[in-house]
Amino acid sequence: VESHRPGYPRLAAFLNSDRYFCAFKSFGRLHARVLLDKQDELIEIQEQLEEIDQAETTSYFLHTRREDRNSRRREILLQIGHKLIEYNALLRDYYSHLEQRKPQRTHVESISNWLHGNKPLVAEESVFLEDWEDLSSPNHPVDHGGLERFLERCALQLDKIGSQKSTDNHVLHFSPQCIAAVSRGITTILAVATLTVPIAVLYSIPKMTSRLWAITIFTGIFSGALCMTHTRNFEIFSATAAYCAVMVVFVANLPI
């Protein structure tokens, strides 16, 4: 990062150095304002088209496009076509911005601290971070969940897993490959443990009531572990139900 000249070049290099530093204004209010303006234009033109249709003296022209001699209607329809293309493009862009993930507070604070410490821009051009609610960031990878975020917080104390993209000792970049590898290792261990440990425990419990309580506890642990991953609610419910069913079938085959 420091190899670039101070100012916009260095700020651009810093923001591009890590996906979590990619936080830009989405201009949500401006998008909505322009959409409202375009929307009213279309409403106004639609009313003009309806007035032309109502004032049409030759009803046959309303049943045919090829022989319609009302040139004003053709102009209005062409105008509506162009306006709709603009409106739909703006609407898609606005909805895509709404689907973007909001940056985490800690990441915005990191960017703000770097701006405060390095001052790459003049004061009046450094206000884009003031409205945090209007910032958007790239969406997380599909397998990025609570466990990865926990490991990132732990990594603040372990400089070794960082990648040297900056000579500034106050800037620490996480290695996504290292975080992902550690996460996969922990996930593998948990996956094995959630199956083997309950089996061993249930074998050692003689009473059926105690076994059912053990199943409840292990099912809760399994569901909590799923919450640490990037899993949707119905997937957590389905996986938990399947896990509980397997445990119940296993217990039913154990000698009392």
Image (spheres, rainbow, N blue to C red):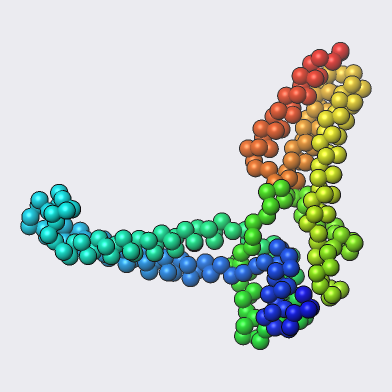
Q: Compared to 226, does 44 lie above or below?
A: below
The residue lying furthest to the top in this view is 255
**Is 99 positioned to the left or the right of 221 in the image?**
left
- Residue 52 vs residue 12: left or right? left
* Residue in the image at 80% along x and 20% along y: 250
Q: Is residue 61 above or below residue 75?
A: above
Residue extending furthest toward the right: 204
Answer whether residue 109 is visible to the viewer in this image: no
Above or below for 207 versus 127: above
Q: Nearer the viewer, residue 145 or 213?
A: 145
How many numbered circles are shown?
0
Considering every residue shown, the one lying at the far front of the view is 66
Q: What's the residue at 77%, 41% (across, down)?
A: 225
Kindly indicate the quadrant of the structure image that contains residue 75: bottom left
Looking at the image, which residue is at 62% across and 85% down? 124
The x, y position of residue 119, in whole percent, is 73, 83
Residue under the point 68% across and 43% down: 231
Q: Quadrant of residue 44?
A: bottom left
Residue 104 placement (x, y as % from top left): 69, 62
Q: Quadrant of the N terminus?
A: bottom right
Residue 13, position in %: x, y? 71, 73
Q: Which quadrant of the figure contains the C terminus?
A: top right
